[in-house]
Amino acid sequence: MSYLEAFLQAVLQGLTEFLPVSSSGHLSLFQHFTGNSGETGVFFSLMLHLGTLLAVFIAFRKTIWQLILEFCSMVWDLVRGKFSWKNRTPYRNMVVMILLACVPMVLTLLLKDFYTGFSTDDDILWEGIFFLITAAVMFCADRCVKGKKGPGGIRARDAGAVGLAQALLAPLPGVSRSGSTISAGLLCGLDRETAVQFSFILGIPAILGGSLSEIMDVTSADLAATGIGQILVGIIVSAVVGLLAIKMVDYIVKTDKFKYFVWYTALLGVIVAAIGIFEHAVGMNLVTYLAG
């Protein structure tokens, strides 16, 4: 992998990780058309996700710190026997709901091989279908009645719905993690700011868990095939671009631009699915076909 390819993938990851357009789907397309798909592509995608994880920590550091303090306070209250759910603060409620939303991640681990198969099969037809699923889910969320639940109003069923969206839909290349989880939150009645905040913070344990799972399978051959320098470039660039993308998400929330991403993912899904069908018909990659 060249430094230019590493840089371009990092920019792509940083931009699409937080926008509701599926970073894994875009990376899968890039790797498909540049010949970097397969196990090496999956490993480098993992490194880029770690870069955008840094961006989340930096962008939401104040909220994350408050949640950490509230979690410690909650544990201390439990130890002293002074825990009161009835008089909980909004942050305490959010801590508990995030923990509940993490439970479905067990399903992701159980289905790990199933999801990895889509990322390494070098077939983009499924990516096209999954982009269309993302568009459909976001379309429903955009059309629903705008909710008013803040951090203190999140309920167990809301956390469960968002957690299931993250566990079952988000790992598919072409299904946006942020798009599916934000949509689930909106459909459950969360206000837009809370839905976005809950989605991003919930992504921290998901990305960490997935990263730790994948790192256990990393070999020296993966490192050699990718390159240490390219990995560092990927992590740094994806973190910086990710911070800028978070600012864009803030703009999306304030100006109600969610619908534009519905049409973008729908159009992209149709184009990618069409290319996938064509490649099946001719029996080769589109780039190879055009070059020949």
Image (cartoon, grey):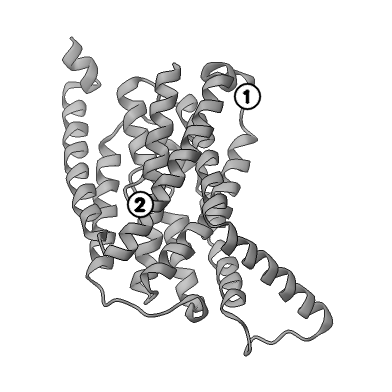
Mark sitting on residue 248 = 2
Mark 2 belongs to which amino acid?
Met
Q: Total of numbered circles in the picture?
A: 2
- Residue 288 picture location, percent across and down: 23, 15
Q: Nearer the viewer, residue 91 or 288?
A: 91
Q: Nearer the viewer, residue 54 or 223?
A: 54
Residue for point 53% across, 17% down: 225
**138 over 157 or under it: above or below:** above
- Residue 174 picture location, percent across and down: 33, 44
Q: Decide: few, some or many residues near mark 1? Use Cα within 10 Å; few <14, some 14-19, many ≥20.
A: few
**189 over 241 or under it: above or below:** below
Residue for point 33% across, 37% down: 26
Q: Circle 2 — which element?
A: helix
Name the residue that disc number 1 marks: 219
Left-right relation of 224 to 116: right
Mark 1 belongs to which amino acid?
Thr
Q: Furthest residue to the top?
A: 292
- The answer for how far apart the CA atoms under marks 1 and 2 are is 36 Å
Q: Which is closer to the viewer, label 1 or label 2?
A: 2
Q: Decide: few, some or many residues near mark 2? Use Cα within 10 Å; few <14, some 14-19, many ≥20.
A: some
- The quarter of the image holding the N terminus is top left
Of pointers 1 and 2, the one earlier in the residue sequence? 1
Mark sitting on residue 268 = none
Left-right relation of 131 to 95: left
Residue 1 in view, yes or no = no
Residue 214 in view, yes or no = yes
Residue 137: quarter of image: bottom left
Left-right relation of 163 to 61: left
**272 over 37 or under it: above or below:** below
- Residue 6 picture location, percent across and down: 44, 24
Residue for point 27% across, 53% down: 133
